[in-house]
Amino acid sequence: MANGKGAKPSKEAKAAAKAAKKQASKERRSQLWQAFNLQRKEDKLLLPWMIGAFVASVVVFVLIGIFVGGLFFLLPLGILIGVLLAFIIFGRRVQKTVYSKAEGQAGAAAWVLDNLKGAWRVNSAVVGTAHMDAVHRVIGKPGVILVAEGAPHRVKTLLAQEKKKTARLVGDTPIYDVIIGNDEGQVALKDLQKYLMKLPNNIDTKRMDNIESRLSALGARGGPALPKGPLPGGAKMKGVQRTIRRR
């Protein structure tokens, strides 16, 4: 009897895998092109910045090649770096546009939290109001972070209540509270991820699992059904960023 262990994939399996990979690549290119066109229509400086970065990179490497030699080696390198710089500029300007459009919209903070990179446990709208005010709970190595978005005079009460309930279950684990906004003592939407990343590491993964299990006992208490995310024209920022990184 043939042993399945270590058996080589059949030609059909290889062909299917190759086709799937090709299709995924095609979808990424399509998504990137769609995002580029959306951004280009709204951002008149996008092309000048991208072209300028590309040309500047090529010129610098050509000049270095002329003066020190090795032009045929440095020119391709300058082109590659120029393309990379253009994509970095594209990604950052797309991100800036997305954040500016998301500012003040219901669900904006939840969308930002859902795009966090790393071992974060996000529960959107663990509590909220009919006015689309909400408190989101994040568990990470800093501890528990409660992020509130909505009218400050309403979310302060929600935040205080949720912090009190959470403290009963997490013991001495640090609890941070954040209100999204541009006033003093608040955190701007565009700075939310940066703010979370700068928090100190206070607990390990095992403690995170334990806290998550305890807090699940609080259950869902009727938080608002927030939008999936305030993205312009249906563009998926998370997918765009992933595509740019692969470039």
Image: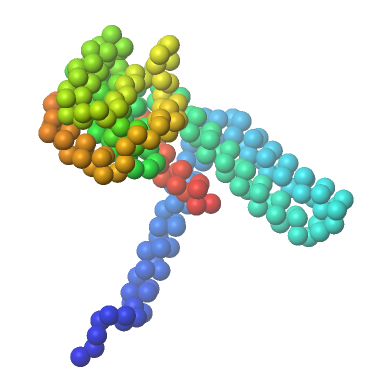
Q: Nearer the viewer, residue 196 or 200?
A: 200
Query: How far across and how far down the image is residue 133, in percent?
Result: 25, 19
Left or right: residue 201 versus residue 3 is right
Q: Residue furthest bottom?
A: 1
Q: 18 and 147: which one is in front?
A: 147
In the figure, residue 104 lies in which quadrant?
top left
The spot of residue 183 in percent (x, y) is: 42, 11
54 lies above or below 25: above
Q: Residue at x 47, y 49 (%)?
A: 243
Color scheme of the displayed model? rainbow
Tell me: 232 left or right of 158. right
Question: Could you tell me which residue is drawn at 36 percent across and 20 percent down?
Answer: 180
**Is 226 positioned to the left or the right of 27 in the image?**
left
The answer to whether residue 209 of the structure is visible from this angle is: yes
Quadrant (top left/top right/bottom left/bottom right) for the N terminus: bottom left
Relative to 240, say whether 106 is above or below: above
Spot the residue most to the right.
Answer: 67
Residue sitting at the far top: 153
> Residue at 30% of width from left, 32% of height from top?
143
- 180 relative to 57, above or below: above
Q: Is residue 199 rendered to the left or right of residue 66? A: left
Q: Is residue 190 above or below residue 141?
A: above
Seen at 27% across and 80% down, the residue is 5
Pick the front one: 80 or 153? 153
